[in-house]
Image (tube, grey):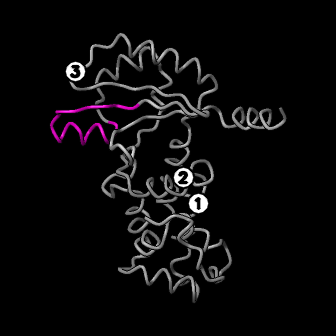
Amino acid sequence: MMTNSEHSDFPSHASQAGTFNFESLVAIIGYKLTAYIGGATSIQSAVDWLRNGLPRELEPRMQATFDVVEPIAAAESEVIAQGFLIRTLEEVGSYRTPARMLLDADVGTARAVLMQATGEFLSNDVPNLEDVAGRLQERIGRLELPKGAGYKCHLWQGQLSLTLIHTGFAKETQRKWAAGINWPCWDQITASVPEMMRARSEIDLTTGFPFRHLHACRSRAKEDEANEKNR
């Protein structure tokens, strides 16, 4: 995947219809995903669209893609937005991933389904993050986890992460855990800390371990950041 830093050579052309900035979309999701959603087999097509203008028939599909990923990129990062497009998502049914749905489904249907999924994806914030962290750590300390599995809780800069560390388990079990499915003792955790039902699951690209994370409410986080700057 390509991130924003890899688009410094973008030409100045945008979509000819001017309904949205096509360059901004490519900056978020990269050439490869742009070409894929546009039905092209080579990233050169995305480069050509930037240089010469986006074909009119692709504009609704690319506009829908931008509407879906821009809120995620703004709240999180371009990499997270890219990851959202290629992750398996139950809501898209047989299309399996948002990118495939944007490519093959009716544009209006894809946009409606994925905008709702985007909203849910970004709803993992809570107002009392320190309290949640305290209850979570206390609950983890009392779990009877399978041998070879453990949880690590970490609170830092307005984000609470719960990492599942494991070794010696079957590949199918690891695959499910990586997708956030059937984590050990998860019912016990959410019974004591129901906020964790809203936590998003991701993979730590450095360690390979799955983790779930919650954010402090963004309005509160911004307020705390402003107060810190004024000190």
Alpha-carbon neighbours of circle 3 within 10 Å: few (<14), some, or many (≥20)?
A: few
Query: Dot 3 lies on which element?
Result: loop
Answer with mark 3 or mark 1, whichever residue precedes in sequence: 1
Query: Dot 1 lies on which element?
Result: helix
- In the image, residue 28 lies at what x, y percent? 55, 64
Quarter the N terminus occupies: bottom left
Say what amino acid the circle numbered 1 marks: Asp
Residue 26 position (above or below residue 132): below
- In the image, residue 141 lies at what x, y percent? 38, 13
Say what amino acid the circle numbered 2 marks: Met
Depth-wise, is mark 2 or mark 3 nearer the camera? Answer: 3
Instruction: Report the number of numbered marks.
Output: 3
Marks 2 and 1: in contact by CB < 8 Å? yes
- In the image, residue 126 lies at what x, y percent? 59, 28
Q: Give left or right: position of 151 versus 168.
A: right
Q: Residue furthest bottom?
A: 52
Q: Label 1 to label 2, Cα distance in Å?
A: 8 Å
* Of 37 and 144, the residue lying toward us: 144
Name the residue located 72 percent from the left edge and 36 percent from the top edge.
219
Say what amino acid the circle numbered 3 marks: Pro
Residue stretch in magenta: 163-180
Q: Label 2 to label 3, Cα distance in Å?
A: 38 Å
Answer with mark 1 or mark 2, whichever residue precedes in sequence: 1
Residue 24 position (above or below residue 151): below
Q: Which mark is residue 115?
A: 2
Q: Which mark is residue 146?
A: 3
